[in-house]
Image (cartoon, rainbow, N blue to C red):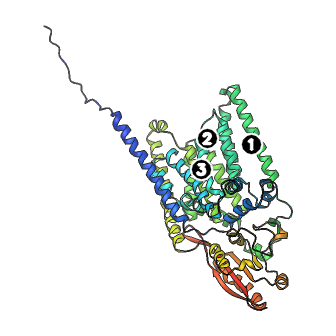
Amino acid sequence: MTEVLIHAPDTEPVPTAIPGKKAAASNWWKIGDVTVLLVYVCITTFTLQYHEKWADEAQAWLLARDLDLKTLWFHELRYEGHPGLWHTILWFAQRVFHAPYSAIGYIGLAFAIAGVAVLIFKAPFPRIVRWPLAFTYFLVYQYAVIARPYNLLPLLCFTAAIFFKDRKHPERLTLILILLAMLTFHGTIIAGCLGAAYLLEAYKCWPQFEERLRHKYVFCIGLMIALCGFLFFILKLPPDANFFFPVSDLAKQLQPTHLTKIIAVTSGAFLDFIVPSALFVALSLIWCISRRQYLSFLLPVASLIVFYSLVHGYAHHHGTVFIAAITGLWIAWPTENEQESFGRREQMYLRAMVGLLLVLCVVNIWDAVVVIQREYKFPYSGAEDAANYLKAVGADQRPIFGYMFGMNAVQAYFDHNILANRAYTYSHLAISSATEILNVAEIERVKPGYIIVSAGVRQEDLQPLLDSVHQPLVSDGYTLVHISDGYMFAKRAVYEREVYFIFARTRP
């Protein structure tokens, strides 16, 4: 008999992963994703219960309520300066589902939840980044609780990031970019930048494309060009828009400089202070360059910052830069297969980027915690309280005069125009329709029962504004009978006061 010798291997066999355990671990991670989304829904829904809607929320609602779609799109939007996707959604909500004004917050929140769901379930970032990112200031509050068109921005931008690397189906990205461009002018800027970056990437692969795919690209480019023409047609400012209202020399002197605006928007979008925020943008851009995928980050972020430096860049607009940056990093983020082939240096850079995003999350979660606490304790706007007071005293049964843009937020709580000095419930942003200044002659002629002055101003300007209107109204027989206070929160600060002063006529 031949003896067979069996030699033991020099090394221990590497145990292979058990498929059942892998599936179980994956299921637990999915449960974690769902749990995070549910926590997000609970926090935002809770906060929404305490949010008092302000004038910008009401403006879109009133436009959708009082106008047909043709008038809305081809006449009124040119005074707004924004496309009307959000207005159209509200139009259908009111006409088809008979939604009351109280539903506007839930409509906006539904889109916000959808956007965060895409982030949690589809983003390429590790869960240590995805989960806290969902609870950052803009995603959990500013673009979730406050019902504005920006609530759709994360959903559309994150979906665009998913389709960005798909070179074989340009029609998918094109559809998302069209919706994004129809949302707001800021969305139009982001859509144009992402579209340009996508085409430059596709151009590199053009020789390998089949004829049918090339025709798809040509068709999609034609759609985007047609969209630009359409938006130019409906948004071309008319000569009587109040954007052209003459500004006094004093007002010009008080306007912030371009540099001040750049500092404000960069700080507000990221880490609240200019030095760390600028450092975050610079390091993120360097990392995107190292990934050879920097245009989708650089173009929208830089374009928005430049745009805000030229126009205004209010605090609630800063989040558009934040969302654009996250979208750009999403597009540049390596896939799992790419990460497996990374060398030591590339792995180190990726870990550094994860750490940088965690810093962004920590600061913005802190901002979110503070602002949600303040929403619970204090009114965001005095509009709801002012409307309740007017209803309680039956003020709408007599002529009422209202001044300044903030009156939209009061009008939305009534089913008719309660203001005798306005032709519309909403603010028609034409010079001829301006109701920013007290018209003493008109007041003396009509003798309205109540006069409301809304104040959306900085804290230091509130008392001077009250002083400027109090004396002439008291002299004309009016008494200040009610103050509805409000605070427009922006991160850990109050951006401006949202107060309503109600005067009643006490002398014939």
Q: Quadrant of residue 488?
A: bottom right
Picture quadrant where residue 391 is located: bottom right
Name the N-terminal-most of marks 1 and 2.
2
- Which label was assigned to residue 155? 3
- Given residues 387 and 398, the one toward you in this image is 398
Considering the numbered disc 2 on the image, is that residue within a helix, a strand or a loop?
Answer: helix
Report which residue position mark 2 lands on: 164
Q: In the current view of this chain or complex, which residue is farthest to the left?
A: 1
Q: Secondary structure at mark 1?
A: helix
Q: Residue at x 49, y 37 (%)?
A: 338
Picture quarter with the C terminus: bottom right
Q: Position of residue 47 (x, y in %)?
A: 53, 65
Can residue 159 be seen here? The reply is yes
CA–CA distance between discs 1 and 2?
Answer: 16 Å
Q: Residues within 10 Å of mark 2 (few under 14, many from 20)?
A: many
Which is closer to the viewer, label 3 or label 1?
Answer: 3
